[in-house]
Image: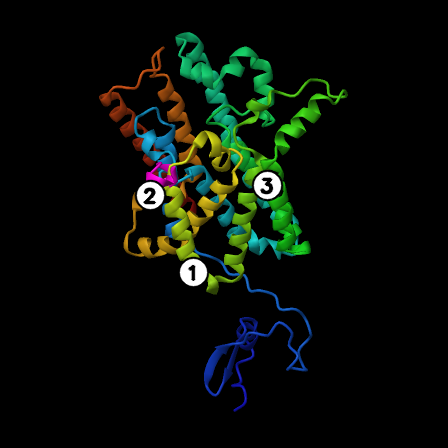
Amino acid sequence: MADVPLPWRVEPCVRALGLTCRNGLWTVWNPPLWASSTAHLTREPFKPTFVHMNRRPEFDSLRGILLVLMTLTHLPTRLNTISNQPFGFVSAAEGFVFLSAFLVGVVYTNKIEAADPNVLWRSLWQRALKVYGYHVALLAFAFAVIGTLGMATHRPAIHNLLGFFHEDPVTALWSSLFLLYCPPLLDILPLYVVLLLLTPFILLGARKAGWTRILCLSGLVWLSAQLGLKRALYDLLVFIPVLPWPPLRIELSGAFDLFAWQFLWVLGVWLGVGRATAPEKREVVSPVLLSGALVVSVALLLMRYQVGIFSIDMDLYGALVDKWTLAPVRLVNFLAVALLASWLSPKVFRWLRPRVLEALGRASLPVFSVHLVLCLLSLALLNENEDPLADWEEVVVLVATFTVMLLVACRQAAALRNSHTP
């Protein structure tokens, strides 16, 4: 039977969607990679169909869980011993960076095919500028409020946090604006800013050269970071005579090694692009791969807690699980846990909808920023000897912190609803 004729106004739209009707059945026409069997078709490589992914509640919930873990880790309470790396040699920071990269890959894939390539650049750099604005606001609060409080009260916890600001406030101010000086707790947003700025190069480079080359290049940079690339570049800058000033001490640049953590970001973007271009493959996970990930995760979890025969000498093998350089064993541990989480989370959140975690995850940037403000303020509660807080003080700190975080998330949700209201 020939194709069913369509009204002239309907036919272009239906054909544009790739629909055809044969024998009374509507089907989606998918051309092969090379259409050799159809002489009337132009011989062009198959281009993947990009799809718009609606907001997935499991992603928001995962980000909410990561925010809760980070908050518990950063607050000066006894719960930080539990929340710090509870699933092995994996912290919430790895999950936060990887999930952010994955969502960037999903969201910005469509812009790669836009007629104007400036759309991709402008969108990502505007996002980076927004994150940078939050970082500058946090710096202003830390220097103006926490720094002044530390000098007035002589709290050692605050002094250790902003020691360089107290030594040389002018240099600390301008170097922090250029992301050269990153105090503790305030060093993950600068990493996020730089990675967002690099993302257009990653996406466009992958489009021209292919993801294999991009991943290999990123992997080589990560490997160089394990061999001391950051220290080598710093030592080189020290001996360059044309610099008007010596660079800051390397420990002031933040704990996260950009050369190592960029690999995790590139992996996340790559997987996000794959999800956007081939959504039908997202549920296909090899049982063998899942079993291997489970074995690796359990073994490293037992090593993390030094259980039985899995006890290891951390002084000897600690470099293999170093957080700041994203050491090899830590990277393998995270990828194994991430694979298990990606397989399990849709099944869990299909039946369980943690609305509170979803709300926190949807407003991740403002909630993350306000959690840092509250963590900085909580350091002022520690006395000169840095004794642990009393039980009632810990309860007050925890209740106040999460209440404010939820209020910020609710305010963000209300603002989003109002912006969509005509």
Task: Say which mark, if any, is on residue 222.
Answer: 3
Along the line of sight, the residue nearer the viewer: 34 or 177: 34
Q: Is residue 174 above or below residue 349?
A: above
Q: Nearer the viewer, residue 205 or 4?
A: 205
| Residue 287 can be seen, yes or no | yes
Q: Position of residue 273 (x, y in %)?
A: 54, 55
In the image, farthest residue toward the left: 392
- Which residue is identified by label 2? 357
Q: Which residues are magenta?
A: 303-310
Instruction: Give me the C-alpha separation between circle 3 and circle 2.
Output: 32 Å
Res 288 label = 1
Residue 221: % across, % down: 63, 41
The CA distance from mark 2 to mark 1 is: 31 Å
Q: Quadrant of residue 245?
A: top right
Q: CA distance from mark 3 to mark 1?
A: 27 Å
Q: Measured from the top left, where is residue 240 in percent x and y?
A: 74, 23
The crowding category of the residue bearing disc 3, from other C-alpha atoms within 10 Å (few below 14, some 14 to 19, many at least 20), is: many
Mark closer to the chain start, 2 or 1: 1
Badge 2: residue crowd in 10 Å (few <14, some 14–19, many ≥20): many
